Amino acid sequence: MGIEIISILLLFLVFFFLLGYGVPVAYSIGISTTLALLLNIAFLPGLTTVCQQMTTGIDSFALLAIPFFILAGELMNRGGIAQRLIRFAKSLVGSLPGGLTYVNILAAMLFGAVSGSAVAAASAIGGIMTDQMEDEGYPRPFSAAANITAATTGLLIPPSNVLIIFALASGGAASVGALFMAGYIPGILLGLALMLTAAIYSKRKGLPAGQRVSWRQLWQDFKRSFFSLLLLLIVVGGIVKGIFTATEAAAIAVLYAAVLAFYYREIKIYDLAGILLASARTTAVVMFLICASMAMSWVFSFQSIPQLMTRFLLESVSNSILIFLIINLILLIVGTFMDITPAVLIFTPIFLPVVTELGMSPVHFGMVMVLNLCIGLCTPPVGTVLFVGSGVAKVSVADVVRPLMPLLLAMIIILLFITFFPGLSLWLPGLFGL
């Protein structure tokens, strides 16, 4: 067994051991990468190499969009946008049987899309909707489950930080603009599937319908939420039309969200310090994950792991459909114990050469990968959105798991549709020439 194979095995064994032992993901990535390089006699200065790759890995203009979108999300979270989106969603679908469940899902979709953050959507919408739904006779665990799964749609519907990270990890094979346009149909389909599942549950449990609102009230609620929804058109439309880059769009989103928050009079000047501090903390965590993951990705490339994986899968499995199912299964498992950002950065360079060899577009694979990992955000043991959603709903994770299962099944069904019907992801980018 050559030293290269031993270093690869060491990398994975140390990484999964540290992860299982409870070491933070970024540290697990950095330590395992460094040890793998130190073992390889071709790269004795392992520490220097890791530092260099971590530095060059985040030296990207596109990554400047991430701190801006994080700050925009914080401003939206505290700027009264969630309440306006909930009122609009309630006027739109609240009168249906089990209507507050649809309100919960639709509001989480809208806020997740506007803020670009599943955690922010689960926190902002779940904190408001769970109490309202309990007052109307809805079980708290089910309310939390609907909110948790719906919050992940914001990672598919642009603007989305994860799609920017995938564009970086793909090495330019997929543009941010194409990924943003590709995310609309999968994200909307996912939301509709969750609503259909909720409708079946509501009918079985006899959950109440809300009061029907007049067209006048619907129009009033739409006008109140219009400027919040307009952000989506400004950001995505500007990128697609080539008016500005994703990074410039993120800066515009910050300015727009700040103006909107002050216009709604939900935040004061003295609130900005806390908002900036919270954004800086989140940015630091995300950026450290990115730079550590980029170092590991470089090791993968140096050790020819993507080429080895491509050769192994193509030689051992002759059926392309089976290969896609295997990759989906691996990503589903990965998503249960790894956060979405490092998972995208680590596994995109491994699996992207495999799927492109089989004729799958990088943009299409981006949708498949992100949706896979969104499911992982809703499942233990790591599921960030699961724990945030359960926390704001004040219910235990154990209680949420049972009503969560049919919603997760709906997400898996949509994942299979997205995997085997590429037109669902590629039609809109093709329509806009991306």
Image (cartoon, rainbow, N blue to C red):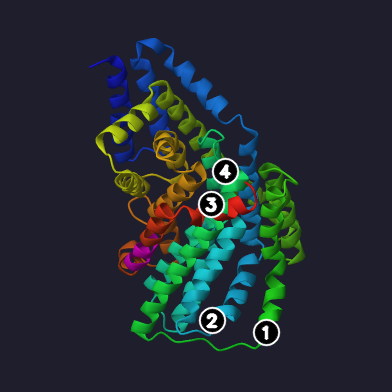
Question: Dot 2, how many residues are within 10 Å of its Cα: few (below 14), some (14-19), or many (20+)?
Answer: many
Mark 3: few, some, or many residues within 10 Å (few <14, many ≥20)? many
Q: Earlier in the sequence, mark 2 or mark 1?
A: 2
Residue tagged 4: 164
Q: Earlier in the sequence, mark 4 or mark 1?
A: 4
The CA distance from mark 2 to mark 1 is 13 Å
Dot 1: element: helix
Residue 359 on image: x %, y %: 43, 41
Spatial separation of the CA atoms under disc 2 and disc 4: 34 Å
Question: Relative to residue 379, is residue 197 depicted above or below?
Answer: below
User: What secondary structure is the magenta-colored segment mainly?
Assistant: helix
Q: Which residue is mark 1?
A: 217
Q: Are marks 3 and 1 in contact (CB under 8 Å)?
A: no
Q: Which residue matches tag 3?
A: 426
**CB contact under 8 Å: marks 3 and 4:** no
Q: What's under tag 2, amino acid-wise? A: Gly
The one of 231 and 329 positioned closer to us in this rendering: 329
How dense is the environment of label 4, judged by Cα within 10 Å: few (below 14), some, or many (20 and up)? many
Query: In the rendered structure, which segment of residues is drawn in magenta?
Result: 405-411
